[in-house]
Image (cartoon, rainbow, N blue to C red):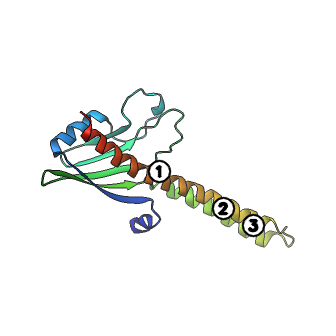
Amino acid sequence: MDTFLRKIQLIKDISIQLPVSKTDFIQKFRTNVDESDLSFVPFEVFRSSTSEYKGNIDGSAFELKKRRRLFDTNYSFATVTGSLIDRNDKLIIDAEILGFKKRMIFFFAFIVLIYLIAFTGMMLGSDEIPFFVLPFLLIHMSLMLGIPYFVIRRSVNRMAYDLERDFHYWVTKN
């Protein structure tokens, strides 16, 4: 399943090189990321924090996620897990950005099931089906499956961009 999700760009691997040591990066990570276990927090948008990310880090691995904000239109579904490798006075961060959660399978399966029932009901139920119903259902199905896909894919690409930008900013900031 992971290879399929990588092909449709709902999982992305990135590698970032930073001119900093691992201990300095861990310190900057802890100052710029709120400590959290990334579980669902109701009313998260009402919590005040200056940090843009929430997550945790241990010796050589981290995971983080963008904090949800009130009236934020950038849907941030992606979570990042990564590892830190120190080589030749450079820190190499290998990260995996995951936009697809396993619980979304139920959502997509439910939508496909509803459309299968609608199509079979149309084919078996009536002899006189108006011409516009089948194209309308096909367009509606493509929108109901396509819009979440493109939102999640944009979230993954946006997270990759923001992560690289923010990590470089953390390192160069005094």
Please name the residue that numbered disc 3 is placed on.
135
Nearest to viewer (mark 3 / mark 1): 1
Dot 1 or dot 2: first in sequence order is: 2
Q: Is residue 167 above or below residue 146?
A: above
The residue sitting at the right extreme is 128
Residue 55 relative to residue 109: left or right:
left
Q: Could you tell me how far apart the alpha carbons at marks 1 and 2 are, in whole angstroms? A: 22 Å
Q: Is residue 157 above or below residue 64?
A: below
Dot 3 or dot 1: first in sequence order is: 3
Please name the residue that numbered disc 1 is placed on.
155
Residue 57's x, y, as percent? 25, 43
Please name the residue that numbered disc 2 is placed on.
141
Front-most of 169 and 99? 169
Q: Is residue 96 above or below residue 134?
A: above
**Classed neighbour count for the residue bearing mark 3: other residues with Cα under 10 Å, few (<14), some (14–19), many (≥20):** few
Kind of residue sitting beneath label 1: Ser
Circle 3 sits in a helix, a strand or a loop, which is it? helix
Do residues under tags 3 and 2 come within 8 Å of each other at their CB atoms?
A: no
Residue 90's x, y, as percent? 17, 51
Residue 147's x, y, as percent? 59, 55
Nearest to viewer (mark 1 / mark 2): 1
- Name the image quarter holding residue 108: bottom right
**Classed neighbour count for the residue bearing mark 2: other residues with Cα under 10 Å, few (<14), some (14–19), many (≥20):** some
Quadrant of the rendering where the C terminus is positioned: top left
Q: Could you tell me how far apart the alpha carbons at marks 3 and 2 are, in whole angstroms? A: 10 Å
Do residues under tags 3 and 1 come within 8 Å of each other at their CB atoms?
A: no
Dot 3 or dot 2: first in sequence order is: 3
Q: Could you tell me how far apart the alpha carbons at marks 3 and 1 are, in whole angstroms? A: 30 Å
